[in-house]
């Protein structure tokens, strides 16, 4: 297998990993491998780099995820039908002898799946033939080994399902309710995993803190003045680590309030919140935000990851230093995005403003412009998909790098040299995309 | 100018059947054929193409089989069936019939005598 094929397979694995495997999906994956390989070879003839060709090959696939969910759903419904037709003995059977669910048997001897022993009196591990071995430390599937970490993966999935239960490791639960009016809110958690969501209260913040050991000095302190309420993380012992998980429910009346989130080395997840000002100040944090609306957002991130989906800001200032920033379904009417030596992936972008990149690379897919857009990079690489159904002016300038326009439809060029291109697309342009690079490259699709 | 997606959408199946009626082919090649037939004015992304393949295969207008490439990954080829050919022929007739009428309807000038 060539290394390109390997890379294509790895990328596909990520795409496919969200779906339960079935024959049709496996066949579809093989079909895609062949097509992507050939697409890659075509792009490799014209693209500058191997990565670019690979990105382009995957780009031209389109919305492959809807095909995947189609195939996996159809398969499940087919399966249900065939099963209900050919049920001879009951699929689920409980008796004194044991429990049988399909070919899963649980009885006094242990747990068996088909002919393979999964767990019995001697072993508390899973062995399925040669290909799957699971024990306390990790799982080996084929030749891949996954080590289990006891960090925050479970909490994240719990958060996604909106199911806030007490974690199994918790030895202490501290909860508080804080009434709010119009004060601004500050949440300062040094290194914890913190989840923000909208609760069902009118004007109460609900605070739930879980700790792996019980000591009231770990609990957060709440400080209130006329203009702000601050919640600050309690003591965190240095020698014996205390595991903690914080759930913060914000009331619906939060829409006119300002929130500031401060964190170092933790995990932050924010979901389904509408508010006035949304400030974030983080360092080495995994920051994830979904379905957020605000008049203004001010995000400062240092060497962490930002991942946001379905966000709607009137104005936003996003500063990210040496981290990765991924924004999807983003609407920012006036954006000011400043990246130094990180990379950014901005999809389904609606809006305008300024994007500045020092030495990182940016992949920008624009749905719609609502004002002018200025892109500036010193040595980074810009790849930009321009709006499909909207006309616009462009002004692209490179000092010592290069500019390439891949779009072939109805463009009008006033200036066209290898490092300066100016003109417009369509008949009725309103806004301008202005991109400059010093030594980097700009590619327009 | 781009061709309007609304205009062309109803013809996706016919486009694919037309290409397959001229020889068995696979996803990426079909998408390249579409690009070259339209002089680079139109392209179908592969997601749309695969969805159409699956639909056509389900209703029996195309069939698929795996190629026997000795190098690289194996390709899945699609082949038009006789029921697919019938569909293509019917769609072509419909189009020949409709295109003149539509063109008259959207660009023709109404003269006195037409107002009965």
Image: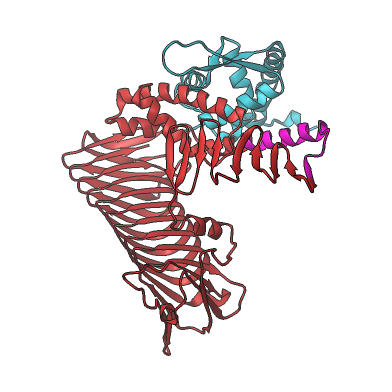
Chain shaded cyan: B
Q: Is residue A157 left or right of residue A374?
A: right
Q: Nearer the viewer, residue A257 or A432?
A: A257
Residue A123 included in the magenta stretch of the image: no
Q: Position of residue A114 (x, y in %)?
A: 66, 33
What range is drawn magenta here?
A: A71-93
Chain A hue? red
Q: Nearer the viewer, residue A400 or A173?
A: A173
Is the residue A209 above or below the residue B58 in the image? Answer: below
> Who's the residue at 44% across and 26% down the image?
A36
Residue at (36% x, 26% y) in the render: A4
The reply to whether residue A408 is in sight is no
Name above or below for residue A249 compared with residue A416. Answer: below
Q: x, y (%) of residue A154?
A: 51, 56
Residue B55: name its quadrant.
top right
Judge left or right: residue A188 versus residue B6.
Answer: left
Residue at the bottom extreme? A226
With respect to residue A1, does A410 lie above or below? below
Which quadrant is the C terminus of chain A positioned in?
top left
* Direction front: furthest residue: A122
Q: Is residue A382 visible?
A: yes
Q: How is the image coloured?
A: by chain
In the foreground, A148 or A379 = A148
């Amino acid at each position: 297998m060539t290394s390109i094929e390997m890379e294509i397979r790895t990328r596909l694995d990520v795409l496919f990993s969200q779906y339960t495997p079935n024959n049709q999906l496996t066949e579809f994956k093989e079909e895609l491998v062949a097509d992507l390989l050939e697409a890659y070879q075509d792009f490799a003839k014209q693209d500058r780099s191997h990565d670019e060709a690979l990105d382009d090959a995957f780009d031209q696939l389109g919305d492959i995820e809807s095909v995947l969910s189609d195939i996996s759903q159809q398969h499940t419904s087919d399966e249900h039908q065939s099963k209900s037709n050919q049920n001879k003995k009951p699929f689920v059977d409980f008796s004194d002898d044991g429990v049988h669910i399909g070919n899963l048997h649980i009885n006094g001897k242990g747990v068996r799946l088909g002919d393979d022993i999964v767990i019995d009196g001697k072993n508390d591990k899973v062995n399925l033939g040669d290909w799957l071995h699971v024990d306390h430390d990790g799982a080996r599937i084929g030749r891949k080994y996954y080590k289990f970490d006891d960090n925050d993966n479970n909490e994240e999935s719990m958060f996604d399902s909106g199911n806030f239960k007490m974690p199994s490791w918790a030895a202490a639960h501290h909860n508080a309710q804080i009434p709010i009016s119009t004060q601004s809110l500050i949440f300062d958690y040094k290194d914890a995993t913190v989840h923000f969501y909208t609760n069902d209260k009118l004007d109460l913040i609900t605070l739930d803190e879980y700790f792996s050991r019980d000591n009231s000095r770990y609990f957060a302190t709440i400080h209130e003045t006329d203009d702000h309420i601050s919640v600050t993380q309690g003591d965190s012992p240095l020698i014996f680590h205390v595991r903690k998980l914080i759930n913060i429910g914000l009331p619906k009346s939060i829409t006119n309030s300002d929130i500031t989130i401060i964190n170092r080395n933790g995990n932050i997840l924010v979901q389904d919140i509408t508010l006035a000002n949304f400030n974030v100040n983080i360092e080495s944090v995994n920051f994830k935000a979904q379905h957020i609306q605000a008049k203004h957002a001010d995000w400062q991130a240092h060497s962490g990851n930002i991942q946001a989906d379905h966000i709607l800001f009137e104005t936003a200032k996003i500063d990210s230093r040496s981290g990765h920033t991924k924004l999807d379904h983003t609407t920012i009417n006036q954006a000011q995005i400043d990246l130094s030596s990180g990379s950014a992936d901005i999809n389904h972008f609606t809006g305008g403003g300024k994007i500045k990149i020092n030495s990182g690379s940016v992949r920008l897919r624009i749905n719609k412009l609502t004002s002018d857009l200025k892109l500036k990079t010193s040595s980074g690489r810009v790849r930009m998909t321009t709006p499909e159904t909207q006309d616009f002016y462009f002004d692209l300038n490179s000092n010592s790098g290069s500019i390439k326009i891949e779009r072939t439809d109805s463009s009008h060029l006033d200036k066209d040299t290898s490092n300066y291109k100016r003109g417009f697309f369509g008949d009725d342009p309103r806004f301008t995309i202005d991109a400059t690079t010093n030594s980097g490259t700009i590619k327009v699709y | 100018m781009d061709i309007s997606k609304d205009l062309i959408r109803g013809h996706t199946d016919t486009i694919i059947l037309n290409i397959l009626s001229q020889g068995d082919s696979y996803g990426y090649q079909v998408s390249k054929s579409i690009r070259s037939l339209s002089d680079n004015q139109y392209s179908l992304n592969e997601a749309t193409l695969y969805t159409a393949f699956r639909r056509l295969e389900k209703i029996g207008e195309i069939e698929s089989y795996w190629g026997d490439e000795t190098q690289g990954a194996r390709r899945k080829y699609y082949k038009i069936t006789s029921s697919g050919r019938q569909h293509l022929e019917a769609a072509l007739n419909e189009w020949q019939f409709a295109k003149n009428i539509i063109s008259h309807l959207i660009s023709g000038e109404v003269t006195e005598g037409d107002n009965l």
